[in-house]
Amino acid sequence: MSHPDTVGEGLKSLALQVGILITLVTASAAQDHSGQQYAQTDVVAGARVYAALCIGCHGANGAGVGGIDLRQGPLPRASTDAALTTLLAKGIPGTGMPSFTLDPNDARALVAFVRSGFDSNTTIVPQGDAGHGRVIFEGKGACLTCHRIDTRGRDIGPDLTEIGRGRTAVAIQRSLIDPTGTMIPINRPVRAVTRDGRAITGRRLNEDTYTVQIITDDGRLVSMVKADLRQWSVSTTSPMPSYKDTLTPAELIDLVAYVSSLKGTGR
Amino acid sequence: MIAIVVLLTALIGQITTDRLIRAADEPRNWLTYSGTYSGQRYSTLSQIDRSNVKSLQLKWLLQNQVAGPWESVPLVVDGIMYVTQRPNDVVAVDATTGRIFWIYKYVGATDYKVCCGANNRGLAMLGNTLFMGTLDAHLVAIDAQTGRPLWNVAVAEYARGYSITLAPLTVKDTVIVGVGGGEYGIRGFIAAYDARSGKEVWRFNTIPAPGEPGADSWSGDAWKNGGGSLWVTGTYDPALNLTYWGVGNPGPDFNAAQRPGDNLYTDSVVALNADTGKLQWHFQFTPNDRYDWDSTQVPVLVDATWKGAPAKLLMLANRNGFFYVLDRTSGKFLFGKPFIKVNWASGLDSNGRPIQTPQPPGATTWPGQQGGTSWYSPSYSPRTGLFYIPTWEDVSGVFTSQPAQYQPGQYYWGGSFRTSRPAPDAPVAPNIRRGPINNWTNELSHGAVVAVDPQSGERKWTFPMYDLTDAGILTTASDLLFTGGREGYFQALDARTGELLWKASLGSAQIMMGPITYEVEGRQYVSVICGNVMATFGL
């Protein structure tokens, strides 16, 4: 596979450093990358369709209906664009999802908006070399020290086996550059001290008014009753290092390409 | 004469108007959506109390085979429970065992238009007849003994976005309903139907036409699609013969510039003569609303001392974040104060009108679109004198507006909103229905039960929850407060202090209705719906 470098090195670097959003709608359309790309005009138009028809239930963030995250997926009933188009036309009987009579342009636009992760800026990072990204992931980046992909790695950080389904390339890029600023709150590292003085550290999996469920740094699932704890703290600082300065811009883009390509094992 | 008496008995049957008026005197039954006409959601039952509540045990479960949020409040009449389930079924249940007598399945149009799911919030009863509004905007009368339909009338055109999701209210010999559809550019109304025949008796349009009082609060043709939906049951004062209803948002929801004026009677409470539907008074909470802040909260009727004199009060905790006290005879504003953080208004003037401080484009507004509270019923305890509000604390969002073009049966939003989030890609709390894992956490907002002293608007106590809450509140004469939340816990608090006394985990599902209590053969029960299951507890 050739390195699909469609922009100059300087521009890549600039994009990474100041967060400029680069659109490569036509240039990269035929290239090998993590996700299909959509015309910017469609994504922008789709945002308007979404605001008119969908936002009432699904919310501005696409997660207004519990258990369904339109931005991040997975959407088992709409695994392809064609399936999503059909679903919009037919609705899901027996649920709150109605059918919509859309003109084909609006339907295409809405699909583009949903599939692009609601990013009406058509935020598409330059496409890197996923193969080389894997080398960085397993080597220089030492990502498996904390993260898991399928059977390899550890559970200190979130499981990345299907991360490419749920996160856009831009979101992955942001996480690599600013792990603390982009940390999803549920993933925050926590520390508990039990009544008998035992300290337990790990990553939060779920929490409610009375209990919290975590996975410890050594991979054990632990559920605790908060009222039984002597101490309970949640850190807002991510244990993950920023790769802004430790990887070159080209390496970073390749790493984004690889992480974006992680779509599960199919099992 | 004897024949007439027999005939009248047969016609009036089981639940008389007098029983409804005196519902508080027969706390063994739960006769209306809020228990009594006052909307206090307070029961004089006291067998379950602070000393024995820890011994509450599960008595029975009712499994619902229909997926989706279950927001219905059951009625209980002399040992039989009547509850609706999605989309428009009625189930008659033995209130002591949970075993089912009959199920009535309404067969209506399936291409109804509802913004927020196929919800139904319950029934009303008069005589031996149950009344249910349907998603395709019909009103159906059902024989409570057999489950057979008696009559069925079309209330509005469902194809134009009208629906009925609220529990009707029976007053005298009429059934009062209101229509939903505030996101579809409807023109809302409240209507009363003859309980025996289904014939319309009166209708009050919540959006006045040109020439009608209040029409000058609209410009041009905006009133035609002005919204003003009804989706939570109102209340009734028999002595004043006034029925009180909270009215929904104006349409289009977010584009206030498209409908200059106050947009009466949206976001208002209206007091109507129960015989004629004539407007006695109104009070508007959010004029020219741009935030989708329906005022469909239950208007709670309280007789209490106000500034040293006995008074007939109406209390309402509004989605806009303010708690209000009105004189319910005249609608006069007596008091108002925020019960959560607000920045859309700097306060209320001497007439209760908000001094609006709209935030600049892109800036954050408190509360957000879901507001500080919503359809989940509050409660007032005459014993503690406190008003209990299911609250969303610190919820905020960014609103945008754009022109909306009305098309029959299509959404008529005129903009959108974005809920604030703690990190760029972080999930935010779902508006309606959550999954089993809380990945939005409590970092930006969470739910609470807030006990407000209505005399001062001050918080007496706060019971914070980690997640938000869509659960109503029940209080009892033993100073217990029952409520749920989005986490599937059913909780009993001390109504005086907010202390947690007992809880049961009913699974990771939402409680989206107000718990009820009743008594059969000397035993008190408490029922709650969590997810797709109704659970009934007793000692």
Image (cartoon, grey):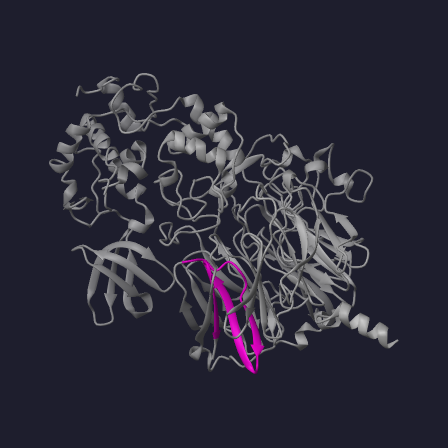
User: Which of B350/B93 is in front?
Assistant: B93
Residue B499's place in the image compared with B327, above or below, is below
Residue B267's place in the image compared with B305, above or below, is above
Q: Which residues are magenta?
A: B509-537
Query: In the image, is residue B532 part of the stretch drawn in magenta?
Result: yes
Q: Is residue A25 visible?
A: yes
User: Which of B279/B364 is in front?
Assistant: B279
Q: Position of residue B107 (x, y in %)?
A: 60, 50
Q: Quadrant of residue B167?
A: bottom right
Query: In the image, is residue A243 part of the stretch drawn in magenta?
Result: no
Left or right position of A168 against B325? left
User: Which of B511/B387 is in front?
Assistant: B511
Quadrant containing the N terminus of chain A is top left
Q: Is residue B247 visible?
A: no
Q: Main secondary structure of the magenta part?
A: strand
Quadrant containing the C terminus of chain A is top left
Q: Residue furthest left?
A: A139
Q: Position of residue A213 (x, y in %)?
A: 29, 59
Left or right position of A171 against B351? left
Which residue corresponds to the image point at 32% horizontal and 65% vertical from the top-left? Answer: A226
Q: Position of residue A107 (x, y in %)?
A: 47, 28
Left or right position of B233 against A126? right
Residue A169's place in the image compared with B106, above or below, is above
Left or right position of A168 against B384? left
Q: How many marks?
A: 0
Q: Position of residue A147 (x, y in %)?
A: 19, 45
